[in-house]
Amino acid sequence: MIKLNSIKKFFSLFMTAVLLFSFGACSKYKSSYKAIGLVRMNTSHSCEASFYSLEGRLVFKLKKTDVGSEGDIYCSVQVDEGEIRLYYDIYGVKQELAHVKAGETLTERRGYVEGGYTVYIIIEAVKGTRGKIVVDLDGAGA
């Protein structure tokens, strides 16, 4: 006969293991931001964010699905006021993709990505006002 205390202990240990695994399996980057008028769009290979006001970190998870393909990352960043830093992480190393200050616009191909890998796009905004960010792993632009 199995004791009730043994079942409770087993269930408690099992739930603890499940919780630890689920926390460990989470993304290494977390979004944490304040925004007004934020519109986000995300597909497997591209992302876009338009906003009236943005401060903090906004993270997108993309994947270049064509295994064996490679190419540049297309990015377009514009902000009327404030500052936007755009990063990408493909191999566990966060690298700067773009840095745009008030009134500037940047539209070009930067960075490098291979197919089959997950790519994190990290947007860090310092009091950004009236801005738009577009990133496309296929290099086609928006």
Image (spheres, rainbow, N blue to C red):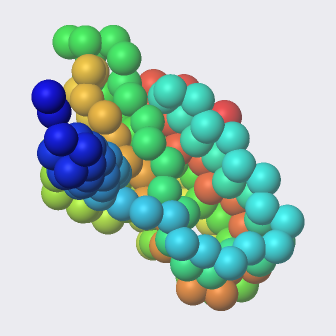
Q: Residue at x 18, y 41 (%)?
A: 3
Residue 11 image point, x, y percent: 26, 44
Is the C terminus in the top left, top right, bottom left or bottom right quadrant? top right
Please identify the quarter of the rendering in which residue 127 is found. Answer: bottom right
Q: Is residue 94 above or below residue 108?
A: below
Residue 96: x and y in percent read 32, 64
Q: Is residue 108 left or right of residue 14?
A: right
Q: Nearer the viewer, residue 108 or 73?
A: 73
Query: Number of labelled discs?
Result: 0
Residue at 31%, 34% in the rendered image: 118
**Does residue 95 appear in this view?**
yes
Image point (85%, 66%), residue name: 37
Give residue 125's position: percent from left, percent from top: 56, 77
4 over 34 or under it: above or below: above
Q: Nearest the camera: 19 or 14?
A: 14
In the rendering, at what x and y percent does residue 21 appear?
23, 46
Give me the residue at 25% from left, 44% from top: 4
Horizontally, is 4 left or right of 122 in the view? left
Q: In this view, does 105 lie to the left or right of 46?
A: right
Q: Which residue lies furthest to the front in this view?
A: 1
Task: Name the quadrant of the N terminus.
Answer: top left
Residue 141 makes an appearance in the image: no
Front-most of residues 79 and 18: 18
* Image-based side of 92 in relation to 45, left or right: left
Work out whether 2 lies above or below 69. Answer: below
| Whether residue 119 is situated above or below residue 26 in the rendered picture | above
